[in-house]
Amino acid sequence: MLRIALPTGRVALQAEGFLTKAGYAPSEPLSQTRKLTVRSQCGRVEYLLVKPVDAPLYIEQGVADCGVVGKDVLMEAGADLLEPLDLGFSRCRMVVAGRPELERRMDNLLSPVRVASKFPRVAQHHFAKKGVPCTVFKLSGSVEIGAVLGLSHYIVDIVETGTTLRENGLVVLEEIADCSARLAVNRAAWYARLEEVRALVEQLSTAVGD
Amino acid sequence: MPTRPSLSFPAGTELVFGPQASRRQYISDRLSDVTRGWGFSEIILPAFDAAETFGDADETELYHLTDREGHRLTLRADFTRIAAKALALELRREPQQLRASYEGRVYRFAPSGHGNRVEHTQRGLEWLNAQGVTYDAATLLMARECMQSVGIEGAVTVVGHAGFVNAALGPMGAGERRLHEALDHKNPTRIAELCSRIGIDSARTRLLAELPLLTGGRDVFARARALGLPPEAETALGVLESIDGLLAQAGAGAPLYDLGEVRRFDYYSGFMFKVYHPLVGEALGGGGRYDRLFDRFGMDVPAVGFGFNLARLAEATDHNPYAGNGEHIAAADAGALQRAVAARAAGRQIRLGDA
């Protein structure tokens, strides 16, 4: 039986719709259950309900064979996973944002810029790639306030509509990546459970394509 | 007041004791039986070497150290590069076919917090001046025998070819790091996006975006051909088909093929393979052909080889005939040592100790 990690919360609910359409309906609604593992009605898969940020670890270690994970979470985790299918929902953009008067090209390269983010690894990597020295502060939420109150020059965060940024007087200064939910697969499972994984990829691909 | 020393070791180091260690010993012994059975002799290699030996490896994985004379050294990150250097000396003295097997630790840094290991024990082999597909197939047969010898069932061997992906990438795609990454992660959306950004033509884009799906049995050969292949990819496919034929003749079951397999920091030039198991999240081992590895020494040495990770093999089997404790002999008893010597002389396992 294939074990699929599903991040609890919004992603699981959206994923549940597509999984049901693909023929992998869970045996009880994921929004109502308090169980941590739920089988599918078809008996082919078992869902592991995990915190979104933990999903890549479960998959990489082979506890789950695959899972539904946001690209933002995958980028931050840096886990070595296969990513055969873009599920297309939970779309957002990973961006560098800040007060409108700041211009990235004016960055002082002789002293580190300060960056606040829930995605410290992504932020560090992005600025390092541009050759801009930076100090990253890891925040757990309300990242915008980091830039508003002057903790940092910039924030690195995901934006969907940009409303939160606008309401706090911040603008997008740079795009890092387009994010969406992905089907991530453990490397060993891709081969050792080839038929099961391929059936899942094909049926999910049809379900999200319709 | 002196502080007590910490009882922990750095994250990711390997510490095995008790039944797990005896299972490891059993696995190591059976694998060395297999390599010895195929005529390989052991080579004992340095645990570190000049940094240049690992100059083309993934820098982010290497452990560097400096000795008291200021030489920059690197802890052994893989056996093949260091064995090639050691055996190049032997080949320079006398060109010949060499069969060498080895066992030992390799060190590859991995960020902590992911449960990653940095210290690995490997057993493997190098077969030098081994030209032609017979040696490719023989390497796969030996790897298969290694699995059987330790009682591992359900292992899956996945075979690819370094030349296939390179030919599919073509001159425009070959140097594109991000395209290699997208192929490595089997991400067709990203592959297509990068191809269009780089300006790769539509036929090649179609082939590259299909690569993640070209995993399977022999049927992948026909599926690949249907996409229209560059001549070098056709050559690579021919090699895999010959290997497949030889394995069938030898009575071995067909492996899986993965035509989209890429290895960024590896030296493979021909067929390459990995062995997976449903109970283990990472490859148990792998190998392949590396004909260009000796170019740096000004030598032309076609070579094949493989290595297995003993810890991962141990995860794939519970089989452990070494687990027995033997006959207990109380140390306090009169005549204990005579009994011990007699039992050992008869080849029995004993456990001399307190009651």
Image: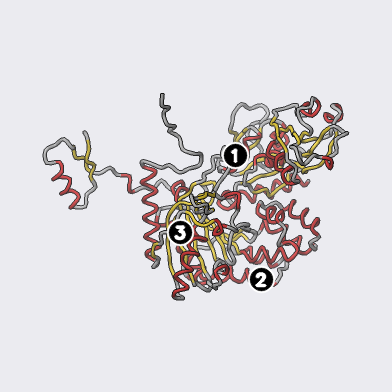
| Closer to the eye: label 1 or 3 | 3
Q: Is mark 2 on a helix, strand or loop?
A: helix
The front one of A135 and A196 is A135
**Residue plotted at (63% across, 58% down):** B262
The mark nearer the N terminus, 2 or 3, is 3
Residue A195 shows up from this direction: no
Q: How far apart are marks 1 and 2 (CA)?
A: 38 Å
* Amino acid found under the numbered disc labelled 3: Gly
Mark 2 — on which chain does it sit? B
The front one of B332 and A123 is A123
The front one of B163 and B148 is B163
* Amino acid found under the numbered disc labelled 1: Leu
Tell me the quarter of the picture where residue B165 sits.
Answer: bottom right
Image x and y of residue A148, in percent: 81, 26
Mark 1 — on which chain does it sit? A
Mark 3 — on which chain does it sit? B
Q: Is mark 1 on a helix, strand or loop?
A: helix
Q: How is the image coloured?
A: secondary structure
| Closer to the eye: label 2 or 3 | 3
Residue B44 shows up from this direction: yes
**Disc 2 designates what residue?**
B234
Is B109 left or right of A207, judged from the image as shown?
left
**Disc 1 designates what residue?**
A57
Is A81 left or right of B323, judged from the image as shown?
right
Q: Distance between the residues labelled 2 and 3?
A: 30 Å
Neighbour class for label 3 at 10 Å: few (<14), some, many (≥20)?
many
Image x and y of residue B261, in percent: 62, 58
Neighbour class for label 1 at 10 Å: few (<14), some, many (≥20)?
many
Q: How far apart are marks 1 and 3 (CA)?
A: 29 Å
**Disc 3 designates what residue?**
B124
Q: Tell how many labels.
A: 3
Do marks 2 and 3 share a chain? yes
